[in-house]
Amino acid sequence: MVLIDCFLMLLLAYGFGFLYYGLYRNLSARVHGRFGPSLAQSFFDSVKLFVKEQSTTFGWMFYAGPIIMATGAVLNVLFIPFINHGDSLQGLSSSANLIVVLYLMVLGPLGNALGVGSNGNPFGVMGITRGLTRLIALELPFYLAVIGVMIDAGSADFSAIFEAQSQEMNLLKHPLLFMAAFISFLGFMGKSPFDVVGAPQEVYSGPATEFSGKFFALLLSQSAMFSFAKLLLMVNLFLGGADDLGDLVLKTFVLFVAATFIGSVYARFSTIQSVEFLMRIPTLLGIVGLALL
Amino acid sequence: MEEGFNAYRQSLESEEQSIKSTQSVVEQAIAWFRAHSMFVLAYGTGCGAIEMPPTFTSRYDIERLGVVGVATPRQADILIVSGYCSPKTLKRVIRSYEQMSDPKYIIGLGSCTINGGMYWDSYNTIKKLDDFLPVDMYVNGCMPRPEALIEGFVKLQEKIRLNSSEAGYIKYRDNYAHYRANQERLFGAQVAPSYEENFAGMN
Amino acid sequence: MLHFEATLLGHLFFGLSLLVIVALLRKNDGLWHLLLLGSLGIIFYASSLVTLFIGWEMMGWSGYFILSKTARVSTLQRYILFNLGGAFALLGAIALLFSFMGSMMLCDIDLTLLPVWALHSVSALVLIAVFVKSGIIGAHDWVVDSYQEASPLFSAVLSAILSKAGIYLFIVLLLKQPHDERVLFELMAWLGAITSVVATFKAISQDEIKRLLAYSSIAQLGYIITALSLMQAYALEAALYHTVIHTLVKLLLFVNVAAIMAITGKERFSELGGLLYRVPLLFVLLVIGIIALAGMPLLGGFNGKFLLYTALLEEKRALLLATVMFSSASAFLYCYKLVYGIYLGQRPHDESPLHVSPKSYYIPQLLSAALLILLGFLPALPTPLFSAIGVEAGFSALEFTKPSILNSPFGSFNGAVLMSAFGVVFVLILGLLQRVHSKAKAAQNAQDISYCGEVPKAGVNLHFGYGMGHELGRIGFIAFILRRQSRRFWDYLNLIVGDLSILLRSLYALGTQHILLLSLLGFTLLLLGGL
């Protein structure tokens, strides 16, 4: 039963992940005044990359890097409940809690960082260093918000967090915490202005520099699923979770469109700018939000 | 013999049908995916580089065809060599091409890649890109407009869908000695390390 | 007369020490190590304050003798000065306690009997001893240099156990506090959190491997100090859990680095790199170590942090928790620097031949890696022990259901499910990836990287393990932290003490009649005071 549930969750995450990825490209094209590719374009890309005849590898650690990354993304999907009540689409979320999920989110990228480091390309490691430096500042406001949510719910379990939001969702209860978390969330989603990690011009697309063919395909697929997992987390933490599948689609979509539109109009911050920005305004928002708790 | 655009088109289609009948469904599907997702490494070697930004941005929006620019050769499917190549640039172009994963294609943008174009008597540019790298699609003109480049992409898309054995990367693999000899003649001692080992175990 | 008593807490700490010292025992300096182990035994099983103090002193000087084989004189002086200072503070606390309790036995100590000022003084004095031993920021001056200059294996001992003696001291002497007097412990909690932040950023900016590990050690002890200051059952469990994990992790990491130093003879990130495929087993062990050090789930390292976070959440200490989590997130950077700088990236160009590392380096690492994996799989395995220790200390028992489920008041998680889910998903994805049409093709050589169409030439540095984290220096807030040095404070103190001694010496130089006059004056004042 649990296995079927997990399988369904993965399927949904995969489907919605690619759909949202396609939508993202479409919507940002509209913002730019273009038409953009078809909705399934990202899916086509990933299939094409999977069937490339060659993929360059630099040894077993390089091979394992994207797999660890994808494993981390899959685990995130499995440990975050999709629906805020009942037994269906809960996956393994009863065996873990919010703190575990927060740390699982970093496990995949760290595994991938090992793969990136092992290929000996300095650009990849530059990207990783940027990412880790940015992470320092990115996590601070997010943690502040998450701590507020957990203290409010009196538990780190998702069920308790849903319970605490049954009357009024956290977005309305703690708007400042939501704002702090949302700014970090933009960064977690790799949206501008915090997308300095994979800058194609300066660091040759950063961590992804050496990944070709099936490895890059795996990275693309996991990033689609991982983005969906992050959307889910935000929905669960601040929008009260989803009552049913329709609600899930609606809430993730709203959040996703907001992130996309904001991401399409900003220019990129440098690493230092983004750290300094994140350490000031969102952190302050988070602290004030906590004080008001 | 019928003449005109329609006749040309029909002849192409019948050729396409005959090739397709020899392919399995999986091969056709793979070819379709390849044709509808093209990652481009746009190497701005010459003045043609100025035509690529409009092609990729709002005015011409080539992303509609599934064409996206990428930064590194590892992920690219298509290399655009945009205009004349000095030997110094060509060395990097070759290196980039060799690091791309099969299947890979080259678009030669502008007359300079065909015969040197207006640099036909220059002492410092190559005259025929095809001597050094297998060009799959030429886009003629000096400079070709973005429309021409898009047309080139569409033609290349058709070629990819046919999945023919005359693709450039197969030619390069099979005739590596020829291309390598040309490269060595041009660069002399400064030629980049050979990529021959890469073809071991392929075919 | 030495008094001993076996307690569970003593068993735990002595068991850890035994594990580390036996794992690291070598023929040439075995005697001193055994002496150190003996002194630790005296501390951990002492039932009277005098025994405890004797053990404390023995630990200080036996460490000194081992350190003196490799360290510079100035480092040694700093080591002994700080440790003596800590020991004197402990002695002061013991004297105060004795004057109020009238007994030297640990079981007779009842802090509720003390008046408030004495309670504060005793707490402050013991805390000084604890902070010096754990190297809390401000008193960490001796730690970094000693760790760096000690022989690699002794650094492991210093970091894995000697720093834990302070934790033991705190639990034994101060844990049974009357709960209304908390100002000092509030301070202690923040000191721990700030220590972890500052030491983390300092660690990131280091070029020598052992200095990085030393700072990371300080940061980890900061977490433990923060956990201890909360004085509740789950926080105590967090502190004890983190102590165990940190002992295992630092044993693994220092021995790993010792092995690397034996193989290459280098000890800086800027001289190392690209060893991954030369010594793959060491690489895997280090990765296990850093995953545990960073507190990632799957391995044991997460459990201690999880308990700490939930304890802080239970106490509603949001800002403190945010600070701790912030430092823990920043720790990823030095963890990655550690593994990248040594094993990943390109080999440096002045490649000298590699020596074969002795097999004995692998045993302690494999042991602690196995324990870390076990604790990841069964996170609540040691909970009954911690619970019993908590009960000994007067706390309520901890919730325990299954070894695989770690409970806390703020939620629980199942390590076995986590680990097996990871394993299954990893294998599935690996299988899928190998099945797909695309062929993996090995890159030609280490120089076959996409480098803007260039072929990297010999002599171009493609490895910047030591450059990693330099960006941090340009971020205002972090640069501010990095510029602070406690060394300056101690130098200043040194200067003042010197000046004061000159003043004092001027008294001697006054001449006999003045001294006589002064003594007469003093005597008169004393008499007047007495009347």
Image: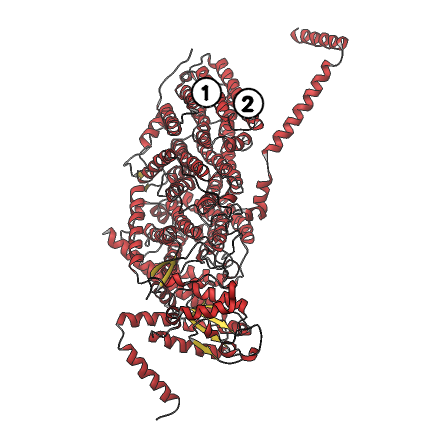
Instruction: Locate residue C371: give its quadrant.
Output: top left
Callout 2: helix, strand or loop?
helix
The amino acid on which the numbered mark 1 sits, given as a three-letter code, is Leu
Query: Is residue C177 visible in the rendered structure shown here?
Result: no
Q: Which residue is mark 1?
A: C111
Give the CA distance from mark 1 to mark 2: 23 Å
Given this view, does label 1 or label 2 mark the residue nearer the observer? Answer: 2
In this picture, is C227 found above or below A264?
Answer: above
Q: Judging from the image, what secondary structure is the residue with disc 1 in?
A: helix
Q: Locate residue A107, reporting x and y percent.
A: 39, 48
A67 or C245, which lies in front?
A67
Quadrant into which the C terminus of chain C falls:
top right
Q: Which mark is residue C290?
A: none
Answer few, some or many: residues within 10 Å of disc 2's Cα (few below 14, many 20 plus, some between 14 and 19): some
Q: Amino acid at mark 2?
A: Gly
Q: Residue at the far bottom: name it.
A: B1
Q: Quadrant of residue C481?
A: top right
Contact (Cβ within 8 Å) of mark 1 with mark 2: no
Q: Chain of mark 2?
A: C
Residue C400 visible to an observer of this rendering: yes
Residue drawn at x 53%, y 19% as measured from the top left? C88
Q: Position of residue C120 (x, y in %)?
A: 52, 23
* Residue bearing the label numbered 2: C85
Q: Nearer the viewer, residue B183 or A97?
A: B183
The image position of residue C304, as x and y in percent, is: 39, 37
Extreme-left residue of the structure: A1
